[in-house]
Image: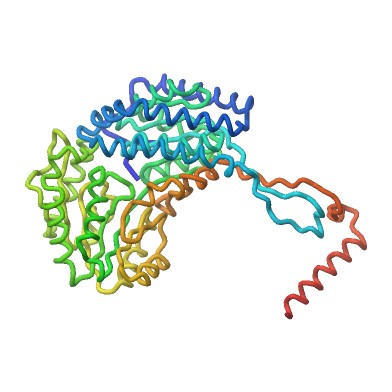
Amino acid sequence: MTSTTAVGHADDRGAAPGDAEAIAELHEAFAAQRAAVLRNPAPDTDQRRRNLGTLVEVISEYRHRIRQALSADFAVHPEGFADLVEVLGVSGRAAFAAQHLDEWMTPEPRLSDAGLLGTAQVEMAYQPKGVIGLISPWNFPFELSLGPLADMLAAGNRVVMKPSEYTPACSALLREMMAEAFDPDQVTVVTGGLELARVFPALPWDHLLYTGNPEVGRLVARAAAENLVPTTLELGGKCPAIVNEDSVTADTVAQIVGAKLVKNGQMCISVDYCLVPREDMARFTELVLAHLRERVPGFASSPDCTGIITARHLNRLVGLVEEAKARGVQVIQVDDAGPDPVTRRMPLTLVIDPPDDLALMREEIFGPILPVKPYDRIEDAVAYVNEGERPLGLYVFAQDRDVAERVLATTVSGGACVNTCAVQGGVPDLGFGGIGRSGHGRHHGFDGFREFSNPRGIVRRGGDDLIDVMFPPYGELLDGIVAHALGSAETRGTE
């Protein structure tokens, strides 16, 4: 999903001087929350709703400082988008969870064999897992930490968060916000560098959420596996947009380019590459250029263009484009402004029909570069997607509904959209997550509540049962029940 630093991942900042103190603080917070779970293992609905209300209040109270912190870390960050996603997105998730808590916490009745269990009551109840570790990324520092926190609080858990060191201003503000809003045995934020990142996933959490890239995700999962800690991994990958021949239109391009410009491509569910009918490649390219000229002229030097998170990340993106040029691939940039090393802004760049061995076709781009590849039949586009890793998001543009449904039926992805992009990540009641290399597990809404809950199967014995037939000594009663059951099965098989 991002380049978040975690276990064993080298970065350009190194270990923080205060890592020893941060690690000690981590262990202290973990122990305090463990003790709090023993004192109150199952917070009631009112307590959970109060926690969610507190989250809504603090995110609203800190709105202006959130804007400032994002601008400090990204060099340039659009204020309106910060409000929409980092503030309203989080408060909306928390408010939605609070609204539905009674419904989610109600045990679910399950069917039972009345012949064996008589009048027993059988149900699935969702109980808090306990203490959850949350490793959040840099690209959406508040939404991807406090959003999942809403799900975890709704499920009755206590949480220790480790935000990214790539966004020091946002991480420091998160720490201040949570310290003001919650007791440390409910929610704690720890900040530090590489050594803290190595230690964090190795603790015996009751659950661990990591959002970041697949390479680091593998290390996190390996560390968690030492304690058999269940994980939710939100990773990412190369999310494709498949454009059908009936949808090479200005509206399609507006959706694809619009999504690509969000956060200047630094979004895990952004379009990573487009597949376009071969005969429509020139038209599609011209539509993209027209959109950039007419709808967002001078975008790369505007306040709506988010800066690339670090100079190293910017240099990596420039290197991807330079490699394509060196191989003789057609590269198109409509904006005269080149990459700006001061604001770290970079214009959207089209790369036309790049070979698959280029780095930009092997790696998640995570920036304003859009490869466009041709296909001859829609089945070829589907086959191309299926030859790669299963993506976090898949987008199909088709006016023919049968074509769209066929693409959905013959591909596998964490989420998908028809005739739009990335919207699946912003629906509070729609579980969000990946599959395979793009991750596993879900958060958002009821799916998030269940992800961070222990589904506990419960049987309450009633009367008129035959439970004792399962216990030794076995005899005629058991033989009769087995013979009757086998006879009934044979009869059903011949009907």
The quadrant in which residue 487 appears is bottom right
Position in image of residue 110 (x %, y %): 68, 53
Nearer to us in this view, 362 or 33: 33
Position in image of residue 300 (x %, y %): 14, 43
Nearer to us in this view, 115 or 98: 98
Q: Is residue 415 above or below residue 367?
A: below
* Left or right side of 335 for 3: right
Nearer to us in this view, 362 or 1: 1
Q: Is residue 43 above or below residue 424?
A: above
Task: Determine if residue 7 is in view.
Answer: no
Task: Name the residue at the bottom extreme.
Answer: 494
Position in image of residue 248 (x %, y %): 22, 66
* Quadrant where the N terminus is found in the figure: top left
* Numbered circles on residues, count: 0
Q: Residue at position x 22%, y 47% from top? A: 261
Q: Residue at position x 66%, y 47% from top? A: 124
Task: Determine if residue 467 is in view.
Answer: yes
Q: Is residue 253 above or below residue 446?
A: below
Task: Name the residue at the left extreme.
Answer: 336
Position in image of residue 125 (x %, y %): 65, 44
Q: Residue at position x 37%, y 29% from top? A: 60
* Quadrant where the C terminus is found in the figure: bottom right
